Amino acid sequence: MAATELRSRPAPRIGGLRLAGGGAAAWVCAYAGIWTVSLLAAGVVAAAGQPATSFTRRVLGLRLSAQRNPPPDLGHILTVAAHNIPIAAWPLLLGLAGADRGRRARLLGDGAVIACILANTVPVGAALGAYGTPLLAYLPQLPLEWAGLALGVSCWLRQRRGSLTARERVRSLAAITGVLLCAALLEVVAIPHR
């Protein structure tokens, strides 16, 4: 009886990034979770009615006016990207810090990643619930921003199950940077501006 030849399938890709070791599944889970939290926050604020929407509007203080947004320029794009990249990429450092070694360290890493997700998605979701569809014109970049955030989160999900190589970290950082540069460009150029 001949042995069956086993062939491994190539790892799936997101964009040009090959996500080995369950990376694609981790990214999809992270992306879905980020959107779920965002939409739950929007639903809670909208369902709670006038008191919640008034409170959220007062706390966030958003002014949906094209006059408040400067015309697009490269400096603004780079500033937005420089703000968002560390927010999405810091989970890459958890493995280097040893957060994947030991149950307690993994739980601390999980807690930090969850806190980051909540700190970034709940205000956006609450704003969607409070301001409704007029806010959508100011958020064309959101799917890309959440994709970048999900890339960072998925790196932690993969790291906690097994080590990421230095090469995988560099590729992940490059993917996060690329996605968030595109998001920044979209945010600066596509939103209503004077």
Image (tube, helix red, strand yellow):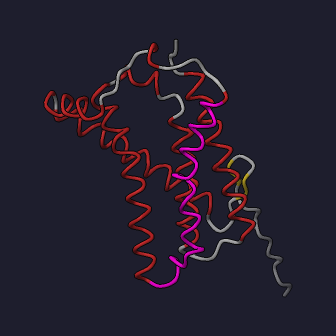
Q: Is residue 129 above or below residue 24?
A: above
- Residue 148, position in %: x, y? 57, 47
Q: Quadrant of residue 39?
A: top left
Residue furthest to the left in view is 51
Residue furthest to the right in view is 2
Is 4 situated left or right of 72 in this image? right
Q: How many marks?
A: 0
The answer to whether residue 170 is magenta is no
Q: Quadrant of residue 123?
A: top left
Residue at 31% across, 25% down: 131
Is 186 situated left or right of 103 in this image? right
Residue at 40% across, 81% down: 104
Residue at 50% across, 76% down: 99
- Residue 44, position in %: x, y? 23, 40
Q: Quadrant of residue 67?
A: top left
- Residue 194, position in %: x, y? 52, 11
The answer to whether residue 86 is magenta is yes
Residue at 49% across, 55% down: 30
Q: Is residue 177 above or below residue 55?
A: below
Q: Is residue 143 above or below residue 33?
A: above
Magenta span: chief secondary structure: helix
Residue range in magenta is 75-102
Quadrant of the image for the N terminus?
Answer: bottom right
Residue furthest to the front in view is 75
Q: Is residue 60 above or below residue 5?
A: above
Q: Observer-nearest residue: 165 or 193?
A: 193
- Residue 112, position in %: x, y? 41, 64
